[in-house]
C-alpha cells in the first residue's frame, strides 16, 4: 500500500556489499529480512562439511532471509553477494507488524512462499531421480528464464562453474565435463565463463524424467 511507504522508509537500512561478501549465514540469529535493491545474491545451504547447495538466486527486487520468520533456531540458509550489490534491511519486528496490517502484501508473500515450496520440492525430486546432465540442463534453462540474456545471447549472470555445480547438486569436475558435452552436442556455446543456450528444445529434452 502506498500509504505504508513512509513507514518503510523510516524502518529500513540500506548498505552495500562486495562480491563474495556474506549477507547472513545459516544459523545466525534472525534479526530481519533483506531485499536486493541492486545486484545478484545466491541463497545456499550446507550440503556437507565441504559442499554447499544453492537453493536459488535473488536478483534486483527479490527478498531474502524471509524463511527466518517465526524461527527460534536462526536463519535456515545463507546469502552471499555474487557481485557488488545494494541491500535493504528491514527489522523483523517491523516486518511482522507489516504482515499483520498490510493484507495485500501478506497475500502476495503467501503466494511467493507457495512458489518457493514447489521449486524446492522439484529440486529435491531432481536430485533423487534426474541424471547430472539433466540437472545441469535444467539449471541453465532456469537461469536464462530468471536473468534473461545479453545482447550477444549469453545468460545474463556472472556465475562461476563452482556455483553452477552447487546449483545443480553436482561436483565441479562433473559439471565441467557435462558442459563440454553440451558444447560438443551443439546445445550450448561458451565465451569465457559466459554460457549461451543455442538449442533450447534439445536442452529441455534432457530434463524430462521417465514416468
Image (spheres, rainbow, N blue to C red):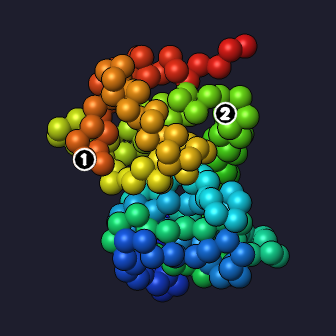
Image position of 106 with respect to 125: above or below? below
Q: How many residues crowd around disc 1 within 10 Å: few (fewer than 14), some, or many (20 or more)?
A: few
> Residue reaching furthest right?
72
Q: How many residues crowd around disc 2 within 10 Å: few (fewer than 14), some, or many (20 or more)?
A: some
Q: Which residue is mark 1?
A: 192
- Spatial CA distance of label 2 from label 1 is 28 Å
Count the numbered circles shown.
2
The percent position of residue 150, horizontal first and vertical second, equals 22, 42
Q: Is residue 133 left or right of residue 76?
A: left
The percent position of residue 60, horizontal first and vertical second, equals 39, 59
Q: Which residue is mark 2?
A: 126
- Quadrant the C terminus occupies: top right
The percent position of residue 67, horizontal first and vertical second, equals 69, 63
Front one among 48 and 59 = 48
Q: Secondary structure at mark 2?
A: helix
Is residue 85 in view from this perspective? no
Residue 203: numbered disc: none
Nearest to N terminus: mark 2 or mark 1: 2
Identify the residue at horizontal 40%, vertical 64% (top origin): 82
Image position of 105 with respect to 114: above or below? below
Q: Is residue 96 left or right of residue 146?
A: right
Identify the residue at horizontal 82%, vertical 76% (top origin): 72
Amino acid at each position: 500500500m502506498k500509504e505504508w511507504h513512509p513507514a518503510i522508509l523510516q524502518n529500513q537500512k540500506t548498505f552495500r556489499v562486495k562480491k563474495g561478501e556474506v549477507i547472513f549465514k545459516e544459523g545466525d540469529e534472525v534479526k530481519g529480512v533483506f531485499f536486493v535493491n541492486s545486484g545478484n545474491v545466491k541463497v545456499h545451504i550446507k550440503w556437507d562439511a565441504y559442499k554447499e547447495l544453492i537453493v536459488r538466486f535473488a536478483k534486483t527486487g527479490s527478498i531474502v532471509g524471509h524463511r527466518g520468520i517465526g524461527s527460534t533456531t536462526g536463519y535456515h540458509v545463507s546469502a552471499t553477494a555474487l557481485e557488488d550489490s545494494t541491500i535493504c534491511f528491514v527489522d523483523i519486528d517491523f516486518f511482522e507488524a507489516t504482515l499483520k496490517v498490510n493484507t495485500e502484501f501478506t497475500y502476495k508473500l503467501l503466494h511467493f512462499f507457495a512458489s518457493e515450496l514447489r521449486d524446492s520440492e522439484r529440486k529435491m525430486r531432481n536430485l533423487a531421480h534426474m541424471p547430472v546432465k539433466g540437472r545441469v540442463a535444467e539449471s541453465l534453462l532456469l537461469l536464462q528464464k530468471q536473468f534473461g540474456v545479453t545482447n550477444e545471447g549469453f545468460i545474463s549472470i556472472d556465475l562461476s562453474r563452482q556455483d553452477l555445480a552447487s546449483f545443480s547438486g553436482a561436483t565441479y569436475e562433473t559439471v565441467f565435463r557435462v558442459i563440454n558435452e553440451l558444447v560438443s552436442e551443439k546445445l550450448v556455446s561458451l565465451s569465457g565463463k559466459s554460457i549461451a543456450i543455442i538449442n533450447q528444445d534439445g536442452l529441455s529434452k534432457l530434463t524430462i524424467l521417465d514416468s
